[in-house]
Amino acid sequence: MGSNQGFSLLEVLIVLGIVGIPSIIAYPAWSRYLVKTKRLEAQLALLDTAQRMEQYAIENSGQYTNATFAKLGLTDKTERGWYKLRITQAEPAQYTLSATPTFHDPTCQQLIFNQLGEKRSEGTGTLTDCWQY
């Protein structure tokens, strides 16, 4: 008699179930974790830009006027390029910074930070959703 080699269909389906079901359950949590990590990159970039804005004001008679990323020694993208940064307002006594994702994020479409340290966001998410550490 010849020996049977290979796997039966039932064995293959059992293995697929063992591997597939945990993967299906874990994928949404993993996706949320990746998005939170990307948001953290934007938060750190905004805080770094805010610190550079304060240094700029000290060097320019206490004013934020005419501040640009080039003058701050920064680029207008986060380190990995997940967010586009903007100085949306730079007046003598106040500034507003924003970070807009370059990927689809309906929950937090924009992170906003100003000279008072106030954090805001635009999108369907709460402030805690968007500015969670």
Image (tube, rainbow, N blue to C red):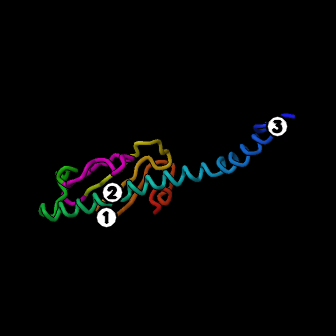
Residue that numbered label 1 is attached to: 116
**Which sits in the foreground, 104 or 16?**
16
- The quarter of the picture where the C terminus appears is bottom left
> Magenta: predominant secondary structure element?
loop
Residue 113 % position (x, y): 34, 57
Any part of residue 88 in sight: no
Identity, as a three-letter code, of the amino acid under mark 3 = Ser
- Which of disc 1 and disc 2 is earlier in sequence? 2
* Dot 2 crowding, Cα within 10 Å, few <14, some 14–19, many 20+: many
Number of numbered discs visible in the structure rendering:
3
- Which of disc 2 and disc 3 is earlier in sequence? 3
Helix, strand or loop for disc 1: loop
Q: In 3D space, how far apart are the residues under numbered discs 2 and 1 (Cα atoms)?
A: 13 Å
Q: Nearer the viewer, mark 2 or mark 1?
A: 2
Label 3 close to label 1 by CB (< 8 Å): no
Helix, strand or loop for disc 2: helix
Residue 114 % position (x, y): 31, 59
Helix, strand or loop for disc 3: loop
Residue lying at the far front in this picture: please name it. 1
Residue 46: mark: 2
Please identify the quarter of the rendering in which residue 65 is found: bottom left
Relative to residue 99, is residue 127 depicted above or below?
A: below
In the rendered structure, the answer to whether residue 67 lies left or right of residue 127 reads left
Read off the magenta span.
72-94
Identity, as a three-letter code, of the amino acid under mark 1 = Leu
Identity, as a three-letter code, of the amino acid under mark 2 = Leu
Q: In 3D space, how far apart are the residues under numbered discs 3 and 1 (Cα atoms)?
A: 77 Å
Q: Residue at x 30, y 54 (%)?
A: 96
Residue 93 % position (x, y): 21, 60
Residue that numbered label 3 is attached to: 3
- Which of disc 1 and disc 3 is earlier in sequence? 3
Q: In 3D space, how far apart are the residues under numbered discs 3 and 2 (Cα atoms)?
A: 66 Å
